[in-house]
């Protein structure tokens, strides 16, 4: 297309315009430019907005899990009352009655009238009788003295205290009735009900399906810990060995290609498929115990291996060839050059990659669902070190899922709280990785 | 002898072997290590290797094979009449193994004497009662056959353990002898040890292949088993998903089409969120952003990729779901009644889209950065604005790579489990309404396999067929994506 073929007559006469005056077309193009840039800024803003919403909803919904509502009452039980209660057919009920009277008295002293309704008190405080009876049977010399009891309130009252439940949105149920809130309000005015930090949530074990207040994440943290121990002890040596082979020794042949293709594919296989593998191979075929951290660890090891291999290879590759050449020149074998010189230099990078792989494994849930770590009520800690690997236990993400799947809304709060704990662990691990990288990374 | 003792003994023998090998080689060279071919420690390591590798190898193989052989031989003891209607030999064998373990525990606790545990003619009622007292039995009535089979299992386990111990110790001793005998100055210990280490490295690298083989076999075997019980055609093209756990199959319809539809629908919604946001974010970060903005925004977006999926699942279930109901539900802000419950395609799709943003953005970012600067300069040189350059030069040049990135994100979306389990619902539907609950392949794998330890029914086995479908789908996407990305990289290298 040369100029000669174009008829000069049909060419529009060039418009006379000044560079100082932007014409319509330039304005349009500049506007398009601005719009396009704005789209980009919007996209980033949307991404960060989602992150903020996520963070806010986690913190807002999760923090209540760390507090619990307790009612503290000074209560004196005389020897006569104790004997009378022990003589009754329903012993704990008798204890409750004494306690409720004391509670009503306490409120009356502060000028607040409440009706003494045993059922209502039970809905607010749970079964107090059992706790009291246990205490006095264990410490008979406390009889006749004034004892300061701190009893935890039910999860619904907890919800009322931290605003999850209001008078408007509540429905009367066997758990709590609107009239009960009057008593709670009276207790608030009297100052005997207060919020304390819920240590049980961090250290305790899971509770039954009807007791959200008593549920704790401690046992599943221990389960996760044992699982991560398995992952660390297996994936680090295997991953490093595989990377050393592929990076330093592997000849260019079909077998090496096969391994490479497999590793890059495994890195993208959905995690649930690893769960199926674990179920079929470790449980169905090898008869390893279900729900055991050992099996979970094995499955997660297979899952994290590709991640660790990829990052380890990158850090081995970053060690300059001159190091190897120098070692070989001094008479070291290739094996010695790698193990004595290359590997130590690559170690910070390898450790960083391993920590990031572990963090990924720590939050992984789907494979754990299939090997039976969900629905299992982890009621206690493992008894010893070995049983920590083989006894059924839960893991943090599995525990969170179990809570989220339960019907009682009180458990949702626990699930969010569990997520805060999980994210604290992940954050710590990632910060550790960043520090390692900053501290020891060497630019060649 | 417990297993841990055997392991400790073998380790002790190998430590002795190391010391012996090293000192013997040194002694043979008259204490002058320069007369040896290798460093003295290599002679020790040679002995150590010759003890540990065969001994532990045999041990592991034995431990894997023993239960299989015992199971097979004990299973032949159980007459077909013993197997209840609706049960399988697998269930009976599970019962036998539980009982066998119960007997072992009862003996260990002392509630049952060793003689009684082994007595083939032990009085049966008393036997069961004692097991119950020891707290070892859950089922109420054990049949005599099961007790006898359990006793036989225990006998064989005891005998097997004894043989294994003897064999392993023998091998360890032989290895010790062999290694020590080799420890002579002219023996090339380093070469041998390094060959061994090399084999170990190759073994570690092959685990990737073994894992893939394991995945393929565990899926394939159970899928074939499933297709024996259920028509493959009905599975692949059935439009109804209605498993019934009551009978032994027959009444269940297990068509995969509704699940695939749910999977694709949710993935499409997710990609509709993730692609525009991720792509524009990548363009802005690589073309416009100042280094400062980039250093802040890129890690912020990547945090989204580091958050565990269970967190997104809970976010979908408890935050996004109720929020969408408030907007699109009955009496909502829009005044329409489209969405009934919090669990819906939209809920899961949007949250999954958020999760995928960093995938799309960081992969595309790398790819856009790989477009040579000369192409941009050429475009600026003929007067194009920055956005025109990006739209007409950079993006077309990067397009194959971006498509690869999107395919990888799609494969993620299809394989994602926790978000759909918590956010998408459980009802399998073929519907176009994005505000309805639907379910996916992954969600159904979870629901068919959790809490069920019997893998004989088609309702449980179908999960493996679903897993196979998922594996093949994601594998295809990954392979295509990897090929495209690799080809693209080569283009500008």
Image (spheres, coloured by chain):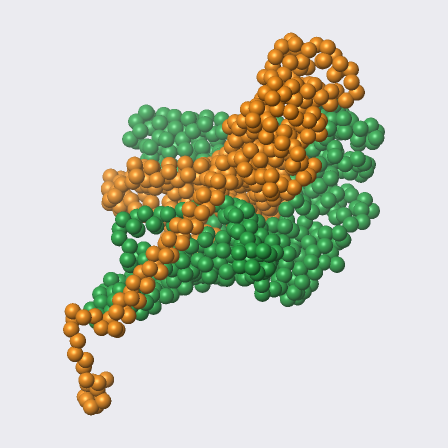
Chain colours: A orange, B green
Q: Quadrant of the N terminus of chain B?
A: top right
Taking depth in this image into account, of A285 and A375 the one nearest to the observer is A375
- When asked about the image quadrant of residue A353, the answer is top left
Q: Position of residue B428 (x, y in %)?
A: 63, 58
The reply, left or right, for residue B348 in relation to residue A310 is: right
Q: Residue at x 36, y 25 (%)?
A: B27
Q: Residue at x 19, y 89 (%)?
A: A8
Asked if B471 appears above or below A81 in the picture, the reply is: below
Asked if B280 appears above or below B131 in the picture, the reply is: below
Taking depth in this image into account, of A299 and A70 the one nearest to the observer is A70
Residue A310 shows up from this direction? no
Q: Position of residue A190 (x, y in %)?
A: 57, 24
Q: Residue at x 65, y 22 (%)?
A: A104
The reply, left or right, for residue B392 in relation to residue A369 is: left
Q: Position of residue A42 (x, y in %)?
A: 37, 57
Asked if B385 appears above or below B441 in the picture, the reply is: below
The reply, left or right, for residue A427 in relation to residue A390 is: left
- When asked about the image quadrant of residue B141, the answer is top right
Q: Residue at x 62, y 33 (%)?
A: A181
How many numbered circles does the render carry? 0
Q: Position of residue B130 (x, y in %)?
A: 78, 27
Q: Quadrant of the C terminus of chain B?
A: bottom left
Give the residue at the far front of this rendering. A111
Residue A420 shows up from this direction? yes
Taking depth in this image into account, of A28 and B356 the one nearest to the observer is A28
């Amino acid at each position: 297309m040369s100029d000669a073929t174009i008829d000069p007559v049909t060419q529009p006469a060039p418009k006379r315009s000044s560079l100082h005056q932007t014409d319509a077309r330039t304005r349009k193009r500049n506007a398009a430019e601005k719009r396009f840039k704005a789209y980009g800024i919007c996209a980033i803003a949307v991404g960060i907005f989602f992150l903020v919403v996520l963070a806010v909803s986690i913190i807002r919904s999760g923090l209540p899990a760390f507090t619990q509502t307790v009612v503290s009452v000074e209560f004196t039980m005389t020897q006569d009352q104790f004997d009378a209660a022990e003589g009754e057919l329903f012993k704990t009920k008798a204890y409750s009655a004494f306690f409720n009277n004391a509670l009503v008295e306490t409120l009356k002293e502060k000028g607040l009238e409440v009706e003494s309704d045993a059922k209502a008190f039970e809905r607010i405080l749970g079964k107090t009788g059992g706790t009291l009876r246990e205490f006095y049977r264990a410490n008979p010399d406390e009889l006749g003295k004034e004892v300061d009891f701190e009893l935890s309130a039910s999860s619904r009252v907890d919800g009322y205290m931290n605003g999850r439940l209001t008078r408007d949105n509540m429905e009367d149920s066997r758990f709590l009735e609107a009239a009960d809130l009057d008593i709670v309000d009276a207790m608030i005015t009297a100052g005997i009900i207060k919020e304390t930090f819920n240590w049980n949530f961090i250290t305790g074990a899971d509770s039954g399906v009807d007791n959200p207040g008593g549920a704790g994440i401690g046992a599943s943290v221990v389960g996760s810990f044992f699982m991560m121990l398995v992952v660390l002890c297996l994936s680090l040596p295997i991953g490093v060995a595989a990377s050393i082979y592929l990076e330093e020794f592997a000849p260019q042949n079909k077998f090496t290609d096969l391994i490479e293709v497999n590793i890059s594919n495994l890195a993208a296989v959905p995690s649930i498929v690893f769960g199926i593998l674990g179920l079929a191979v470790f449980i169905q075929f090898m008869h390893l115990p279900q729900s055991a951290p050992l099996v979970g660890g094995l499955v997660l090891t297979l899952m994290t291996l590709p991640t660790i291999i990829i990052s380890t290879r990158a850090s081995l590759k970053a060690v300059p060839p001159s190091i190897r050449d120098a070692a070989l020149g001094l008479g070291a074998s290739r094996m010695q050059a790698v193990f004595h010189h290359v590997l130590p230099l690559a170690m910070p990078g390898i450790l960083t990659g391993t920590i990031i792989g572990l963090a990924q494994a720590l939050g992984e849930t789907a494979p754990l669902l299939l090997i039976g770590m969900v629905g299992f009520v982890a009621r206690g800690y493992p008894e010893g070190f070995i049983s920590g690997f083989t006894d059924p236990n839960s893991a943090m993400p599995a525990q969170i899922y179990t809570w989220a799947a339960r019907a009682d809304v009180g458990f949702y709060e626990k699930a969010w709280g569990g997520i805060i704990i999980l994210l604290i662990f992940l954050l710590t691990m990632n910060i550790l990785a960043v520090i390692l990288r900053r501290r020891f990374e060497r630019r060649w | 002898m417990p297993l841990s003792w055997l392991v400790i003994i073998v380790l002790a023998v190998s430590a002795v072997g190391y010391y012996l090998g090293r000192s013997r080689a040194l002694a043979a060279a008259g204490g002058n290590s320069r007369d040896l071919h290798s460093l003295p420690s290599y002679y020790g390591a040679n002995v150590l290797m010759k003890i540990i590798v065969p001994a532990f190898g045999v041990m592991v193989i034995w431990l894997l094979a023993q239960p299989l052989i015992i199971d097979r031989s004990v299973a032949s003891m159980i007459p077909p009449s013993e197997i209840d209607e609706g049960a399988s030999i697998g269930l009976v064998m599970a019962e036998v193994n539980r009982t066998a373990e119960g007997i072992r525990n009862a003996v260990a606790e002392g509630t049952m004497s060793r003689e009684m545990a082994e007595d083939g003619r032990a009085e049966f009622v008393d036997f069961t009662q004692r097991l119950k007292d020891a707290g070892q039995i859950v089922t109420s009535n054990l049949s005599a056959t099961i007790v006898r089979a359990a006793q036989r299992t225990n006998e064989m386990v005891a005998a097997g353990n004894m043989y294994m111990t003897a064999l392993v110790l023998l091998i360890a001793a032989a290895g010790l002898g062999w290694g020590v005998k080799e420890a002579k100055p002219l023996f090339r210990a380093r070469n041998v040890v390094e060959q061994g280490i090399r084999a170990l490295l190759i073994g570690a690298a092959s685990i990737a292949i073994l894992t893939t083989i394991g995945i393929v076999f565990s899926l394939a075997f159970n899928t074939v088993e499933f297709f024996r019980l259920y028509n493959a055609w009905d599975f692949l093209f059935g439009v109804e998903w209605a498993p019934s756990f009551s009978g032994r199959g027959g009444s269940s319809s297990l068509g995969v089409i509704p699940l695939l539809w749910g999977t694709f629908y949710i993935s499409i919604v997710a990609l509709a969120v993730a692609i525009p946001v991720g792509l524009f974010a990548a363009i802005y970060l690589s073309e416009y952003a100042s280094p400062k903005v980039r250093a802040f925004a890129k890690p912020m977006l990547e945090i989204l990729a580091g958050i565990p999926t269970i967190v997104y699942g809970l976010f979908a279930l408890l935050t996004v779901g109720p929020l969408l109901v408030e907007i699109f539900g009955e009496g909502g802000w829009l005044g329409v009644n489209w969405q009934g419950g919090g669990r819906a395609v939209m809920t899961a799709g949007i949250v999954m889209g958020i999760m995928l943003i960093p995938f799309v953005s960081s992969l595309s970012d790398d790819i856009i950065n790989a477009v040579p600067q000369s192409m941009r300069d050429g475009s600026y040189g003929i007067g194009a604005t920055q956005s025109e350059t990006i739209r007409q030069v950079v993006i077309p040049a990067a397009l194959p790579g971006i498509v690869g990135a999107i395919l990888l994100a799609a494969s993620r979306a299809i394989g994602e489990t926790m978000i759909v389990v918590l956010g998408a619902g459980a009802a399998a539907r073929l519907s176009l309404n994005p505000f309805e609950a639907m379910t996916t392949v992954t969600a159904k794998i979870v629901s068919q396999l959790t809490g069920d330890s019997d893998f004989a029914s088609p309702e449980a086995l179908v999960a493996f067929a679903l897993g196979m479908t998922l594996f093949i789908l994601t594998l295809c996407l990954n392979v295509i994506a990897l090929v495209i990305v690799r080809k693209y990289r080569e283009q500008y290298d």
